[in-house]
Amino acid sequence: MQCKHCVGAGVRFLPIFERAQSQSYSPQSSSTKAKFSKTMGVFVGTQTEREEKVSLELSEEILQSMEVGMAFKDYNGRISSLDFHRASSYLVTASDDESIRLYEVTSGTCLKTINSKKYGVDLVCFTSHPTTVIYSSKNGWDESLRYFKGHHDRVVSLSLCSRKDCFISGSLDRTVLLWDQRAEKCQGLLRVKGRPAISYDDQGLVFAVAFGGFVRMFDARKYEKGPFEIFSVGGDTSDANVVKFSNDGSLILLTTADGHIHVLDSFRGTLLSTYNVTPVSCNSTLEASFSPEGMFVISGSGDGSIYAWSVRSGKEVASWRSATSDTGPPVIKWAPGSLMFATGSSELSFWIPDLSKLGSYVGRK
């Protein structure tokens, strides 16, 4: 696995993937791991493999049955970011203990830990290649290494283009920079008037920049002409935290520091729903995620709880209180194409359905 380091500067490459297999680690008991692997064998894999095992669509019943199937409690700081690779079973995390960790989700195994003690680590996400990640640091950069240099303050948002070797970064210096992974210099710059939250759509043709109570939509091929649409989020002018598209590109969600999760129609800009949770501190990020088919939204909360809502009805369908003594919002993401999500706080948790609670599943194989 290679790591690319991006912040007020750039890119760092570390050849770690080849060594990962011999350094695997799992803190779970054999019985816990066996139960988790059995359930994951039903719900995780390629689309064909999952269809051959059991065909279940995410429903309120399944969502309400979800519980922690495996937890990694060996972190020495809060997890600040996590990401699933789109086409493999890998997950990567970044933590305040200045570590980056690579996991194989199906087996519930930590394959590798990389420490970035000198420069720190904040945000992390996979590139299109499953052995390469890009991450933002906290403390500066090493001039002897290759980096993408451009920002002058902390990077608070990163988004990779799924179709091209491009990414965008947003910073507290009130700039959004557009990058080509093959070039050290930024390919474009947008100035904003607040903390930016940014995201490419799934096709890589459009990206969104949110700040100041609005979501601005840009054509990635001619962003220099300015936004082609500007959507209001109903007067919520608190700091934008996270903006994301649903997998089919039809919906956008935006979280803000005041504890609001807004869902909009990405074509018309219509505000469809607003969900409310406990606000977060200025040093925290409220993260939310669409389920793979876009029918549900899950989110953390400033008090450490997790909530789920139906996009169709706008109603809360499930909630889970924090299982740790942590306060503050957990980072949270759905696994692509699977009935699983992960949360990160002082520990990493994999959430899966409890098959014993699913009457529709019992007896079906």
Image: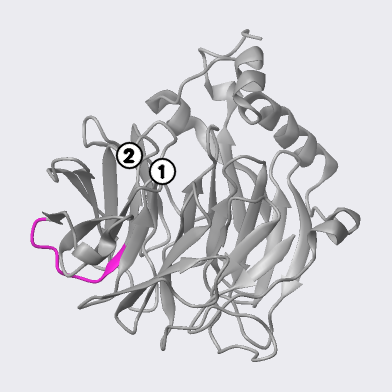
Q: Secondary structure at mark 1?
A: loop
Which of the pair 238/353 is nearer the observer? 238
Residue contact at pointers 1 and 2, CB within 8 angstroms? yes
Q: What amino acid type should be assigned to the residue bearing mark 1?
A: Asp
- Look at the magenta stretch and give its main secondary structure: loop
**Where 162 sits versus 96, above or below?**
above
Magenta-colored span: 234-241
Image check: 291 left or right of 175? right
Q: Residue furthest right?
A: 22
> Which of the colour schemes (rainbow, by chain, secondary structure, one colour) is used?
one colour
Q: Quadrant of residue 98?
A: bottom right
Image check: 17 left or right of 345? right
At a point 61% along the width and 57% down the height, the residue shown is 348
Q: Quadrant of residue 107?
A: top right
Q: Which image quarter holds the C terminus?
A: top right
Image check: 117 left or right of 154? right
Q: Position of residue 315 (x, y in %)?
A: 23, 36
**Where 352 sits versus 224, above or below?**
above
Give the Cα separation between the discs numbered 1 and 2: 6 Å
At a point 56% along the width and 89% down the height, the residue shown is 140
At a point 44% along the width and 75% down the height, the residue shown is 186
Classed neighbour count for the residue bearing mark 1: other residues with Cα under 10 Å, few (<14), some (14–19), many (≥20): some
Which of the pair 353/183 is nearer the observer? 183
Q: What amino acid type should be assigned to the residue bearing mark 2?
A: Gly
Q: Is residue 301 visible?
A: no
Classed neighbour count for the residue bearing mark 2: other residues with Cα under 10 Å, few (<14), some (14–19), many (≥20): some
Q: Position of residue 321 (x, y in %)?
A: 44, 52
The residue at which mark 1 appears reads as: 202
Q: Residue 249 got which mark?
A: 2
